[in-house]
Image (spheres, rainbow, N blue to C red):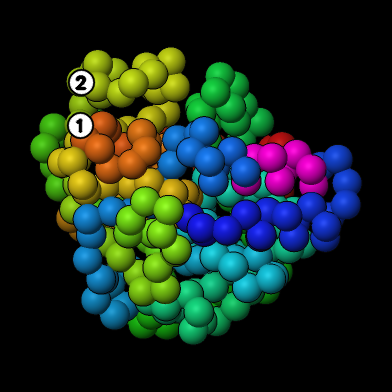
Amino acid sequence: MRNSLLPGLLMLLVFGSCAARDLGLKQLRHRMGLQPETRIIGGSSAPEGWAPYQVSIMNTFGEHVCGGSIISEHWILTAAHCLEWPIKYLKIVTGTNDWTKPGAEYLVDEAKKHCLHDKPMYHNDIALIHTATPIVFDERTQPAKLASNRKALKAGDKLTLSGWGSIKTWGRYETELQKVELNYMEHSTCEGKVKNASWLGEGHICTNTEQGQGSCHGDSGGPLVDDQQTLVGIVNWGEACAVGYPDVFASVAYYQDWIREMQTTEGIAC
């Protein structure tokens, strides 16, 4: 999270429309801590090339916006709330542990957001971004394997979150990719642990973290993987900030049919 409100004000000047003003208000709410936040705290630097599926979703003004995961040569899987920026102002950075030093960059020509995003609040927070040109795969850039069976996860299973979010409250985004090991929490247990159970739905999975370790703001849309680096979750929300409450992710297995359909011409989204 940035310490200054300047980027949000610049957005208002650039867009100059009602939609832009709405976007600025959303950014302001995030900066003031009025919404659940998502960034890595208590993690460590990821080894070079550790997560070849990891991307930075950036704006064309040079700022990191969200995380995401490559799932095919044209498609990035991320959170729906990462699409508050119009797609013409977004680009995808691949093949690097440092988003300021891209391995490659790709412009965005399409995005598909779940039509029931935020209906109810914080549910169906999932989206796909389409690159204008095919992503070139190499040792540092590869698609993620997608989880297909949510029941395969058991309480206490080790999962790993990665991203470039701030490592301290109100800190700047990290330029070096961070990762942190978390524990899978069963849904029934998570319902009793989160502050607001109405924000939790069947399409979510949870992780149990110790105080001072977990997600906060800046890693939204980023990957949660199992010990085989299979993509099981997409960063959605958590109680600000690494204070011992569960972190909540969109379940890749739950949304597998939606993900598959949206990559086709028949897949219509909002």
Q: Is residue 261 visible?
A: no
User: Which image quarter holds the C terminus?
Assistant: top right
Of 123 and 109, the residue lying toward us: 123
Label 1, on which residue? 185
Give how far across and how far down residue 209 sits, in percent: 19, 40
Q: Amino acid at mark 1?
A: Met
In the picture provided, is 174 more to the left or to the right than 58? left
In the picture provided, is 237 more to the left or to the right than 159? right
Give how far across and how far down residue 30 sits, in percent: 54, 42
Q: Is residue 64 visible?
A: yes
Residue 90 drawn in magenta: no
Give how far across and how far down residue 118 sits, in percent: 58, 27
View extreme (left): residue: 156
Q: Amino acid at mark 2?
A: Thr
Tell me where the magenta segment starts and ends, as one range: 20-27
Give the residue displayed 79% in from the left and 43% down from the top. 21
Which quadrant of the figure has residue 199?
top left
Per the image, label 2 sits on a secondary structure element best described as: helix
Label 2, on which residue? 189
Give the residue displayed 79% in from the left and 52% down from the top. 12
Of 223 and 258, the residue lying toward us: 223
